[in-house]
Structure formats: C-alpha cells, structure tokens
Image: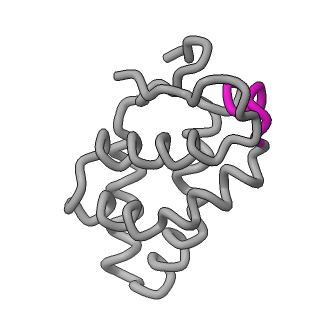
Amino acid sequence: MEAAHGNLPLPEEPIELRTETRTLLEDSPEEGAQLINEASFVVDPLWEEWGETLEASGMDRDRFLEIARGYAGELRLWVVGERPWDHCAAGLAGRVSRRLPIRNEPALEVSQ
C-alpha cells in the first residue's frame, strides 16, 4: 500500500505478527511484555509503510519508536484481542501526526 501525500494509510493487519507476539506473551509473560513495551515489533512494519511520509514531515524513526513506546498499552490490547487492528493503528497514526515537528502543513490524515 502506498502513502498518498499527507496521509498515513492503514496497512493490513499483521496477523502472523500478532499471533507470534500473543504466543510469546502467554508462554513467557515477562519476555512478551518487554517485547510489547519496546514496540519495535510493530514499528518495523509500520515504518516500511509510513517512514517516507513521516521523514518528509520531519519525523525520524527514533522519534516514531519513542511515540509507539508510549502507545504500548494499546498495542498490548491489540495483541491480546481487546482492540481491533484498525482502531489500534489509527490511534497510533493520530498520535504520531499530532507530534509532527513540521506544523506549517496540515496534520496527516489517516486513510482507510
């Protein structure tokens, strides 16, 4: 899925990633919680989708990762099945767009 200028598309749910992460969380709660709190497991695929758009708006991957770590509670709810992917991804996209350093352009919109 390609990003239109000024939009963060909602990628398809990474079902296999969710399943693997949930299994880890169930089998090894501390290790699973650490993985979720680190947030890299979901940042990596989202950066592939959103990275170019975010960089053009002044946000680097490290800042994106920092924001995603602050969203770890919602990521955990998605992993355990309490939140749908589109709700979780759209919430993170909104959080990211509100924290963009370039403010003279309209905030990114989330497209479905």
The quadrant of the image that shows the C terminus is top left
Residue 60 position within the rendered picture, expressed as x and y whole percent measured from the top left = 78, 43
Residue 59: quarter of image: top right
The residue sitting at 33% across, 61% down in the picture is 79
Query: In the rendered view, does 50 fall on the left or right side of 8?
Result: right
Q: Nearer the viewer, residue 84 or 28?
A: 84
Quadrant of res 10: top left
Measured as percent of width and height from the top left, residue 105 is found at 68, 23
Residue found at x 37% / y 63%? 74
Residue 67, image quadrant: bottom right
Q: Which residues are magenta?
A: 53-59
Question: Residue 92: x and y, percent?
Answer: 47, 48
Residue 108, placed above or below residue 14: above
How many circles with numbers are drawn on the protein? Answer: 0
* Residue 28 lies in the magenta-colored region: no
User: Residue at position x 57%, y 30% from top?
Assistant: 107
